[in-house]
Image (spheres, grey):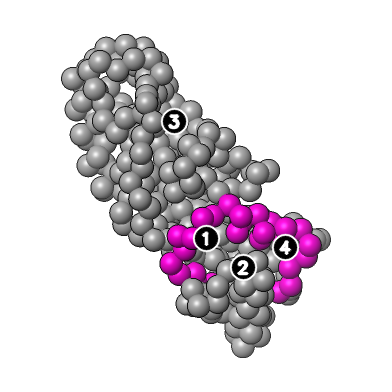
Amino acid sequence: MKKHLLLALLFILPLCRTMAQEETVFSVYFEFDKFNLDPKQGVNMVNFVKAIDTSRIETIQIFGYCDDRGKDEYNFKLSTNRANTIRDTLIARGIKNKIIVTIEGKGRILIDEDIEDVTEARSKNRRVDILVNFKPAPPIKLEPGYYNAIKKDMVVGDHIYLENILFERGSSKLTPKSRQELEKIARLLQKYKNLNFEIQGHICCTPTFQKEAIDKDTRKRELSKNRAYTVYKFFISKKIGPERMTYKGYGNTVPLGKGSEYDRRVELVITKN
């Protein structure tokens, strides 16, 4: 059965801006025993290039993979051909060859014994991962009504832009640094008990027909919602009353208009003061 192209934009530092290196991962999934892109796959590759800020790309790494069937020698060759196909496609779309620093076929990916759906697992292993590393983004200039800290006199509709809320690639689990930042925010929320708010999760760079990204832990397209919920649960654990909070994932539907690096974010929006 023909396998349609699956696309996943997964971020090491999603929903945030940080001076640490930012990395976007784009995965292209291939049909069994194939390394060519069909027309639909080619269109989606074009959409991927258009969705990122190519002026900020520092390096690109390309890694090809196969499923667990076949001999090692054949799989290494097939995975390398898949990686080379992606390289050629990127160069044809205007990506400079000199920033593609790694092109490697890694052969097959073994399946864990306890995997329930072997067919699905194999389809996800027939892929190429494109790792795009970006130069640090410039500091964001906040518009009126947008703040990077919680204040006593905030009004309904004010946005608090959370700068250092970090997540692992494709995950809704908080990093240790994120927890430190949220500790500070929780203390302010405990101080200003009059403020009610919505926790909003945002992503960027998925194709226009995919408003949401995949959470690797649940394997469902619900990443921005899950990240917002993670922040909600953290505040609950810090004794912030649940009646003060709601949470919602907005996917890629509310860009700031300042570039993709600013759209991977979590915001608090004041709903009552």
Residue 98 at least partly seen: yes
Name the residue beneath numbered marker 1: 54
Q: Could you tell me how far apart the alpha carbons at marks 3 and 2 are, in whole angstroms?
A: 35 Å
The residue carrying mark 3 is 200
Residue located 49% across and 47% down the image = 260
Ranked by sequence position, the earlier of labels 3 and 2 is: 2
- What amino acid is found at the position of numbered circle 2 in the picture? Gly
Spot the residue most to the right.
Answer: 1
Residue range (magenta): 35-62
Sequence-wise, which precedes: disc 3 or disc 1? 1
Percent across and percent down for residue 249 are 50, 33
The residue at which mark 4 appears reads as: 42
Residue behind mark 2: 94
Cα distance between the residues tagged 4 and 1? 18 Å
- Residue 233 placed where, x, y %? 35, 31
Badge 3 element: strand
Q: Position of residue 51 (x, y in %)?
A: 58, 52
Does the segment drawn in magenta span residue 51?
yes
| Foreground label between 3 and 1 | 1
